[in-house]
Amino acid sequence: MSLALGIDVRDGETSAVVADEHGSIKARTASGSGAARIGFAVRDPLDPAVGDILQKLAVASGITTPARVVTRGLAIALAEQWCGAAAGARHVVALSLDECVHAGVVVDGRPFEGAHGMAGAAGWLALNPVEREDYRRLGCLEAEIGVSGIVRRLVWRIKAGDRSRVLDAAGGDVNAITIRQVFDGARGGDGVAISVVRDTAKYIGMALANLVAIIDPDAVVVGGAIADAADLLLEPTRAEAARRLPAAVSSSLAITPARLGDDAAPLGAARAAFLTP
């Protein structure tokens, strides 16, 4: 049985799985795994600081074959297409958000990486004609729908004079507001939180429509905070994307929540290692 080790390197921490060729997780260890291949999922493969970290992890694993390095977004797309929400689909787009926005593209069952390994960097999609400093630093989409961006938009509304019960839930401290409180506020009928969530779904839907228009995938998988708040975001996201796509595309497009959770990135890294010639 052939095995691959997949490691997700994220915020200075690592998550590892050992998977077989069918995507079954056999172990959760980075050393003594018995794997013959190794893959890494990282935020930015071009980041010079990543190289030393990956080299040390590869040496510690005891695997001597060259490591495969992909973006975290691509790893998520690969995993969900392999054994997750998009299993069986040939062309897949994945969009996941936490503190950062991650996206990846699978075309005809293979990872699509572009010239620099950064294809699918959806956080940089330009969706607002206004030019802001945080757009230039983070990317337009990430500034709006990354977890901090969602919270920031609600805080701006409060500072502008809007009354929100989310502030009460945070003990009156705008700096203590969390994404969970924003979502809970929307579920509880707080008008400001509902407005922020509605705008978030609009940005997500616009981003997906742009990606779908270019890739024409069989399936779109949404993960991270989008999946966590699927009851709030999924339907309005679908509606916004459909509104911006040709009817022939939107009528057959599946937009589904991710299934693999925190296992997606390391599993996708293992998948990438298997797909390396």
Image: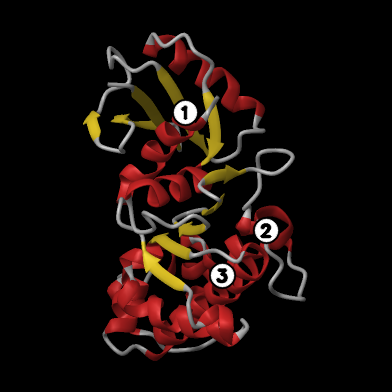
| Mark 1, other Cα within 10 Å: few <14 / some 14–19 / many ≥20 | many
Question: In this rendering, would 151 be left or right of 262?
Answer: right
Q: Closer to the camera: disc 1 or disc 2?
A: 1
Residue 275 seen in the figure = yes
Residue occupying the point 49% across, 65% down = 218
Among the two numbered marks 3 and 2 on one chain, the one whose residue lies closer to the N terminus = 2
Toward the viewer: 250 or 69? 250
* Alpha carbon separation for disc pair 3 and 1: 27 Å
Residue 267, position as x, y percentages in the image = 36, 38
* Alpha carbon separation for disc pair 1 and 2: 27 Å
Residue 136, position as x, y percentages in the image = 74, 57
Disc 3 vs disc 1: Cβ atoms closer than 8 Å? no
Amino acid tagged 3 = Leu
Q: Secondary structure at mark 3?
A: helix
Residue occupying the point 42% across, 35% down = 271
Residue occupying the point 73% across, 61% down = 133
Q: How is the image coloured?
A: secondary structure
> Which residue position holds label 1?
273
Residue occupying the point 39% across, 58% down = 86
The quarter of the picture where the C terminus appears is top right
> Which residue position holds label 2?
124
